[in-house]
Image (tube, rainbow, N blue to C red):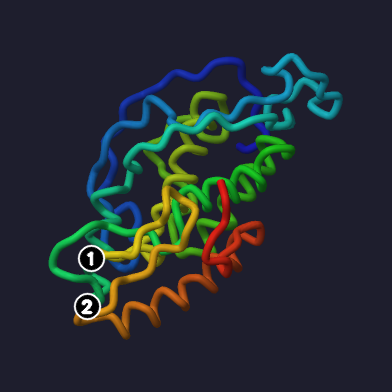
Amino acid sequence: MLGADISACIVLVLTPDPSMFQIFGYPSPPHNNHILAMIIPYTRIDMGQADAGAGGNWLNETIGNLVKSRAPSYNNTRFHQAIVQLGDSDAAGTYCHHIPYARIVRALDTGIVGTTRANTITYLQGILQALNLPTVDNTIVGWNTCRQGFDTFVTWACESICDWPGNQWLGQGTGDGNGTRIDNPVQGSAHFANLTQRLAASDVTLGNAIPTLDVASAYVAL
C-alpha cells in the first residue's frame, strides 16, 4: 500500500521472473539484485530544514536534493538488446544517447526536487508509462513502503528513463560535448535516414513525457 508508514525495511534477495515484463517486445533477463542506489534523494528533513507538510509520514516528506553518480542502469544489457532490435543501428560502435544523458538527469532533478516522495513515485511512473517502460520492478523490495526501497526505485526509474532505448543507437555520433550537445548520427551510416527519422520522433515522445526536458536546443550549458 502506497500510504504505508513503517520505520524499517528488511531487504530480501529475490530472483526476478524473466517474463515479468517486456520492453519493446523483448523480455527482461534477470539482472543484479537491487541493494545500493546510485541516485540518492535527500529530504528537507534529512538536510536539517523544516518540512511542515510531512506530518510525520515519510512519504509526505519533501525531496530537497538528489545526489547522483552515473553507473550502467539495472536494465543496461536488456536495453542494448532492444536498441539493436530496432533495426537502424550499425553492426558496431558506441551506444549513443541522442538527447544527452546528463540533460535528462537535470530535467528529472527539476521534476523531483521540491516534491514529496509520494509525488515522486507518481511523477516517475507517469514518465515510465509514457515511454512504454515498466512502472514497477518487482525485485525491488519495499519500493513504496520503506526508504531504502524507495531510494532504489528512484535509481531504477531514473536510469531506465535516461537509458530509454528510443533515445539511443549503436554506431558513431557527432559527440555530446560532455553532456552539453545533442549527439547526432554521423552521415554515411547505412541506416542514417531511418535512424534520424526515428530519433526525431523519439525527441517528441521524450519531450512530451518530461515537460522540463529541452529536446530542441542543440547546445545547453551544464
Q: Which mark is residue 189?
A: 2
Identify the residue at image location x=73%, y=39%.
115
Position of 201 relative to 153 (above/below) = below
Quarter of the rendering containing residue 47? top right
Spot occupied by residue 61 in the image (x, y as percentages of width and height) = 73, 28
Instruction: Point out the tag, 1 or 2, that comes first from the N-terminus.
Output: 1
Q: How many other residues sit within 10 Å of disc 2, few (<14), some (14-19) or many (≥20)?
A: some
Cα distance between the residues tagged 1 and 2:
8 Å
* Total numbered circles: 2
Position of 64 relative to 23 (above/below) = above
Spot occupied by residue 109 in the image (x, y as percentages of width and height) = 61, 43
Identify the residue at image location x=35%, y=37%.
71
Q: How many other residues sit within 10 Å of disc 1, few (<14), some (14-19) or many (≥20)?
A: some
Spot occupied by residue 55 in the image (x, y as percentages of width and height) = 82, 24
Position of 162 relative to 62 (above/below) = below
Q: Amino acid at mark 1?
A: Gly
Point out the residue furthest to the left here.
Answer: 91
Q: Amino acid at mark 2?
A: Ser
* Near-viewer residue (163 or 74): 163
Q: Which mark is residue 45?
A: none
Callout 1 touching callout 2 (CB < 8 Å): yes
Please, what secondary structure does the residue beneath circle 1 have? Answer: strand
- The quadrant of the picture occupied by the N terminus is top right
* Near-viewer residue (128 or 42): 42
Please, what secondary structure does the residue beneath circle 2 have? Answer: loop
User: Can you identify the residue that label 1 sits on?
Assistant: 171
